[in-house]
Amino acid sequence: MKRRGLHELYAEDPVKADESVFGRTTNGVTRRGFLSGLKSMSLLLGAEIVYGQFMPAGLIPAAFAQSDSPFVIEGKDGLVILNDRPVNAETPAHLLDDDVTPASRFFVRNNGIVPQSPDANSWTLTIEGESAKQSRTFSLNELKQQFKHYTYQLTLECGGNGRAEFSPAATGNQWTTGAVGCPSWTGVRLKDVLDAVGIKDDAVYIGYYGDDQHLSRTPGKAAISRGVPVDKAMEDESLIAWAMNGKPLPLMNGFPLRLVFGGWPASTSGKWLKKIVVRNQVHDGAKMLGKAYRMPCKPIAPGADVADENMCIIEAMPVKSLITYPQSGIQHKLAQALEVRGHAWCGETPVEKVYTSIDFGQTWQLATLTRPVNRHAWQHFSTKMTFQREGYYEIWAKAEDQNGRTQPMVLPGWNPKGYLNNACHRIAVSVVV
Ligand SMILES: Nc1nc2c(c(=O)[nH]1)N[C@H]1C(S)=C(S)[C@@H](COP(=O)(O)O)O[C@H]1N2
Ligand SMILES: [Mo]
């Protein structure tokens, strides 16, 4: 079972795509051409698109772009399964409304086969590599006893979050908006452990190895083995963590031990952590090379080829925001203020401002924004919006970082694997009398 991107489905088989979007067959009304005209879109929405003249061409109304049929996996609540081999599941936006993401609502992204029943009591972590001064193995209990514990709220977002929107479609899990979350993590600082082992002056990168298996079950073949530059590894907030929100990590999220690098593509945060290698070169493990977790170093035309040597490793994630209340598709009474809220985050700097719009970005209203509780924690915005006429609206949110960088309205630069889509999030609202 694998979900496909909306645009891919529409290009190939619009009728089937309509069925999958609407969850039912179309009787009478031909929806095939619905993208072409505002009139027919309004017809399908059953309401006038109030600021329709400003709506970007080719946009699928947010009311139609929602995920359907949630499927529950053990310990997870309301997540939408995108793929069952390996298991990948995202969280609908309205279920991410909590300031601190509950474990039950934190997304799952697996590249391989999850370890069967990892044992915390016998778990060990080995630090080695050509730029480690020695090779050392710690039991999980030793890590807990020998190093100071720290707790931080850290945002993890998959580099492929938002992939479903790219056109031409990019292969991989068709994440819409839900491969992100910001729980509170407890563990030891990676830098304290690296300092205790000793790292050589020529160290440039660390790489991780986890206890999951490659899908082929080839012994010794890693499903994924990524890492970060030493500077990121040495940040105070870079953790070797055993707890999410004060409880042992859920199995799907790396029990009993994982790395957490807030603000960087979550693929760097190795789960089921068994080994860290200190490297004198950029780590070259599985999914570090080729096109994996890399962007074209220079922007390219949609669909264009790009040579592997012109692909650059993704580092900090771009500025982004998510509307978590209300749920997309609600009805709202005319002439009453609607409370709108959500989160905003950025891998590089804190978020400075969040704006919302109800007229497809013609005008923007400044929202109230909290400060992050610590570096790499998401921030919360809230605002009230009012509507002058009945009809179909979309609420869009746009965050801006401290360098003045904002989110693009629709899609940022196309890239072969569909990474870093930080386009504005939008939800559908029908205003009724
Ligand atoms: N060992 C291991 N670590 C891993 C992965 C994996 O498949 N195996 N997936 C990575 C990717 S691509 C992401 S986005 C995050 C997802 O973390 P989560 O499943 O806890 O949400 O874990 C990363 N760490
Ligand atoms: Mo990822």
Image (spheres, helix red, strand yellow):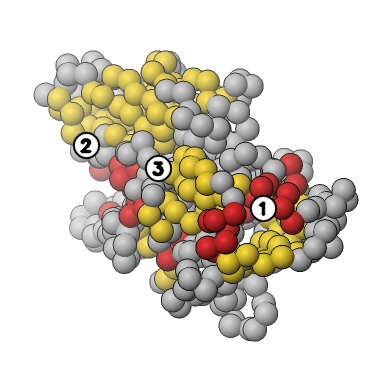
At mark 3, the secondary structure is loop
Image quadrant where one finds the C terminus = top left
Circle 3/circle 1 CB separation < 8 Å: no
Q: N-terminal of the two: label 2 or label 1?
A: 1
SS for tag 1? helix
Q: Is residue 137 visible?
A: yes
* Residue at which label 3 appears: 60
Please tell me which of labels 3 and 1 falls first in the chain. 3
Using the image as rendered, state which of residue 353 and residue 407 is in the foreground.
Answer: 353
Quarter-of-image position of residue 172: bottom right
Q: Is residue 423 visible?
A: no
> Which is nearer the eye, 45 or 255?
255
Residue 356, image x, y percentages: 40, 23
3 or 1: mark nearer the eye:
1
Residue lying furthest left: 433
Near-viewer residue (103 or 420):
103
At mark 2, the secondary structure is strand
Q: CA distance from mark 2 to mark 3?
A: 17 Å
Give how far across and how far down residue 108 sits, in percent.
Answer: 44, 59
Q: Is residue 125 above or below residue 169?
A: below
If the image is split into quadrants, where does the N terminus sit?
bottom left
Q: For the residue carrying disc 3, how many other residues have a C-alpha within 10 Å: few (<14), some (14-19), or many (20+)?
A: some
C-alpha gap between disc 2 and disc 1: 49 Å
10 Å crowding of disc 2: few (<14), some (14-19), many (20+): few
Name the residue at 48% across, 71% down.
121
Q: At which x and y percent is residue 29?
A: 24, 51
Left or right of 129? Residue 244 is left
Binning the other alpha carbons within 10 Å of mark 1 as few (below 14), some (14 to 19) or many (20 upward) gives: some
Q: Which of the labelled discs sits on residue 193, or is there none? A: 1
Reply above or below: 21 against 101.
Answer: below
